[in-house]
Amino acid sequence: MRRYYCKTHRGLFCCIWMCMIILGGCSGSLGKEEAPIQLESQENKKAESESETLQTESITEVLSDEILLEPEMIEVDWSDYFDEMNGSAVVYDASKRQYMVYNSELALKRRSPCSTFKIISSLIALENGIIEPKHSTHTWSGEVFWNEKWNRDIAFEEAFRESCVWYFREVIDEIGQETMQEALNKLSYGNCDITDWQGRLNTNNNNPALTGFWLESSLLISPREQTEVMERIFGMDSVYSEETRKELKQVMRVTETDKTGISIYGKTGMGKTDGVVVDAWFTGFAEVPEENTHKNLYYCVYLGQTDNKNVSSAAAKEIAIQILSHISGT
């Protein structure tokens, strides 16, 4: 240690040595005492540095824990709205980081999204310039479908509102499997499984124009995940363009609720197996007035197969409107 000290502090050592000679002090003791003082100083600085590091890490851990805290889950009894139908409802208030859930077990069960997926296919197509609302008309093939409103040339807004399957089958094919997969991974959309691209697993419909991976096929999502996806699209941290979200909101607007004091946006969806309705949905978000602004409530109502009950997407929609109106006090 002494050699290291003399080598690195040669100038200082020489000055001290000369002072000792002039003052007649002890030449050895002063030189020997200097090194331990330097070491002690270095050790103190090291200890202080380690202390600061530990404090910083502790603060970071606390902040990380706060960021990673799960939103609050509140079980609610909305059974009166469901009229004994097998179903679930989820409403997520992002401003409070709070879920209100009816039938939590079913809220976590993944099912086919059916036509609620038109929200997603529209989002991706708008964001990638595949749908341009003013020039979005697709030409009818001439094939006669069960819904008379589909039997003509049709543009984006009407196709969305009338849930025209053949229109969105064409849109999805234009998007393509690679872009679709990337988009679903980005959204963390349920199981993100589009392997049955053509919808051959759908036993209720084998018409290639009227089926796909989102219709009783490989793609699955839960009611809670539906609300999470809506928040990723329309929430404060959305990565999608303002123009895309504006166009999507316009076609999702539920006009029946104009007199309720809240603005509701959503999409229905319904799937069958062997002619029986097994999945019925209504999902989206609502803008609720709050002081001089508004907040978003992200919601999903799901109905499963229920014997002796008229399960439908229209019923799911009505339940959602009633619940949202109740929450907002309108």
Image (cartoon, rainbow, N blue to C red):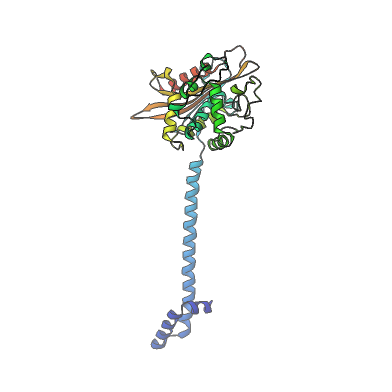
In the image, taking residue 258 as reference, residue 197 lies left or right, namely right
Q: Residue at x 49, y 74 (%)?
A: 36
Q: Quadrant of the C terminus?
A: top left
In the rendered image, which quarter is residue 256 located in? top left
> Is 242 rendered above or below residue 266?
below
Image coords of residue 106 (percent x, y): 59, 25
Which residue is nearer to you in this view: 82 or 166? Answer: 166
Which residue is nearer to you in this view: 261 or 114? Answer: 114
Which residue is at the far top? 308
In the image, taking residue 295 as reference, residue 226 lies left or right, namely right
- Let me know if residue 104 appears in the view: yes
> Is 160 rendered above or below residue 64?
above
> Is 251 rendered above or below residue 12?
above
Image coords of residue 81 (percent x, y): 51, 17
In the rendered image, which quarter is residue 225 located in? top right
Q: Quadrant of the N terminus?
A: bottom right
Image coords of residue 242 (percent x, y): 41, 34
Image coords of residue 142 (percent x, y): 56, 17
- Let me know if residue 224 appears in the view: no
Q: Residue at x 40, y 30 (%)?
A: 295
Q: How many marks?
A: 0
Which residue is nearer to you in this view: 197 or 34? Answer: 197
Q: Residue at x 62, y 14 (%)?
A: 307
